[in-house]
Image: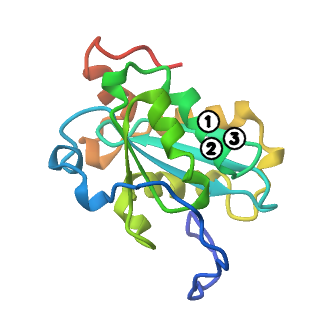
Amino acid sequence: MYLARQHKKRKKKYPTRKTKTVWGQRCSILDRPDDINLRKNFGHWESDSVESSDRKCALNVLLERVSRVCHITKLPSKKALATSNAICKKLSIYPPSACLSITYDNGSENTEFKKVEAILKNKSYFCEPYHSWEKGAVEQINGLIRRYYPKKTNFSKVSHQQLKKVEEQLNNRPRKCLGFKTPNEVYNELGGALPIRI
């Protein structure tokens, strides 16, 4: 009861999909270059979804791997069109040099990744099936978001302003992996080549 995130005992989950989603040609995370894996350059992002209790609306979460800067967008649905539009809108504020790649899981909401590539001129990588920990940075941020909005939260009742405040708190939260600097501090140290975030 004293834990930040309370939940019932987890049950083992099995795949329940009866239909196979049609995908384009995907690039596996196993083929992702070492400079991305080692977090050497700014501009490589991870994307994930946080589902609402009503399974209608959702959140899209984007996290930059070097600075840990995150963006949270409320979606009207978890469908691929809403997800791709949110990603393009959020990352279009950056120059091409700051949006080089996005790593996704294999959820059906990511099937429009070719559209994102065409608009942002970036590269897409996908985790191995059922290996969501391969994009552990954004998964960790999702856990922090769940401290504000536990499971069974209906995101249709959460305003964009409330989500913006959570985003600001997370981007100003000192992180051990950053030497106890905040994501915004690391972002600002990267120099004037990057635009001011909005």
Are discs 3 and 1 less than 8 Å apart at CB? Answer: no
Quadrant where the image shows the N terminus = bottom right
Q: Secondary structure at mark 1?
A: helix
Quadrant where the image shows the C terminus = top right
The residue at the far top in this view is 192
Are discs 1 and 2 less than 8 Å apart at CB? Answer: yes
Q: Amino acid at mark 2?
A: Thr
What residue is shown at x 68% (from left), y 54% (from top)?
149
Above or below — where is 41 with respect to 156?
above
Label 3, label 1: how far apart the Cα atoms are: 8 Å
**First along the sequence among labels 2 and 3:** 3
Whether residue 172 is visible to the viewer of this picture, yes or no, is no
Q: Callout 1: 10 Å neighbours few (<14), some, many (20+)?
A: many
**First along the sequence among labels 3 and 1:** 3
**Residue on which disc 1 sits:** 86
Q: Amino acid at mark 1?
A: Ala
Residue 74's disc is 3
Q: Is residue 197 left or right of residue 100?
A: right
Q: Secondary structure at mark 3?
A: strand
**Residue on which disc 2 sits:** 83
Above or below — where is 5 with respect to 91?
below
Q: Secondary structure at mark 2?
A: helix
Q: Is residue 88 left or right of residue 187?
A: right
Label 1, label 2: how far apart the Cα atoms are: 5 Å
The total number of labels drawn is 3
User: How far from the left and from the top, in percent, is residue 104?
Assistant: 45, 53
